[in-house]
Amino acid sequence: RKEVEQDPGPFNVPEGATVAFNCTYSNSASQSFFWYRQDCRKEPKLLMSVYSSGNEDGRFTAQLNRASQYISLLIRDSKLSDSATYLCVVNSGWEYGNKLVFGAGTILRVKS
Amino acid sequence: GAVVSQHPSWVICKSGTSVKIECRSLDFQATTMFWYRQFPKQSLMLMATSNEGSKATYEQGVEKDKFLINHASLTLSTLTVTSAHPEDSSFYICSAILTSGTQFFGPGTRLTVL
């Protein structure tokens, strides 16, 4: 079983749609959680950190459920520019060398 | 956010040659940097952890004699792919970590070995 699992998609949605991505992780000792965005042939860029209380940044809302080891990302009012691969990323903490483990990514395509 | 640069951004070389890739943290000091590799349509895979002033820590399956890492200063880590072969062609990305634990990635180096 992969350490971080995501639905690869692609998710094809019209502009203005709401779309949700899910992610599960296997290491219960994981300390911090992130969503990164990666555009084609570019490096990943931090979209947002994910907290147990849930957090929102504009049109993006992230949720973490530690008991279920589940992370989600909700994008409201999708824009064409949101088209990218979204990576669920887990950090096991300083004790384990602060290594990031990446999911394979979920592809989002927003169409006009 | 913090800025990490990589050089070169792309390189094409002949099989058997060695290629050096530099990773620099431009506006902060990083005692730890990470090197990743990404093949087409796959996720980033951690190759090694680069520690300033000490030996790098390699992930299982990554040959330390083939992928030489040097972290000589708090702002520079280098990855040298020795005797490169076509199967080493990939997107190599470094990252540097802040004390908060957030990692920032360099823009990546696309290596093509002919």
Image (cartoon, rainbow, N blue to C red):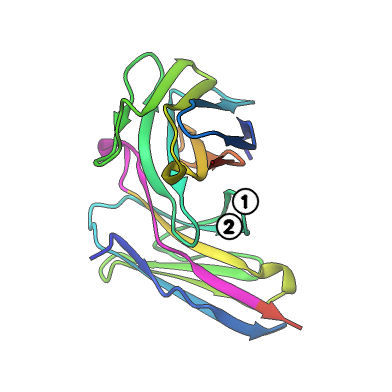
Percent x, y for residue B8? 63, 31
Percent x, y for residue A57? 61, 63
- Magenta range is A92-109
Q: Secondary structure at mark 1?
A: loop
For residue A38, which numbered disc appears in the image?
Answer: 2
Confirm or deny contact between disc 2 and disc 1 (CB under 8 A): yes
Percent x, y for residue B7? 62, 30
Q: Looking at the rendering, in which quadrant would you find the N terminus of chain A?
A: bottom left
Decide whether residue A98 is among the magenta residues: yes
Q: Are marks 2 and 1 on the same chain?
A: yes
Circle 1: residue type: Lys
Up the image or down, B86 lies above or below B68; here it is below
Q: Secondary structure at mark 2?
A: strand
Can residue A77 be seen here? The reply is: no
Depth check: give the residue in front, B100 or B68. Answer: B68
At a point 35% along the width and 39% down the height, the residue shown is A98
Up the image or down, B52 lies above or below A89; here it is above
Distance Cα–Cα, label 2 vs label 1: 6 Å
Can residue B45 be seen here? The reply is: yes
Decide whether residue B61 is among the magenta residues: no
**Where is mark 1, residue-wise?**
A42
Could you say which quadrant of the image residue B27 lies in?
top right
Depth check: give the residue in front, A63 or A108. Answer: A108
Circle 2: residue type: Gln
At a point 32% along the width and 50% down the height, the residue shown is A31
At a point 36% along the width and 39% down the height, the residue shown is B47
At a point 48% along the width and 42% down the height, the residue shown is B102
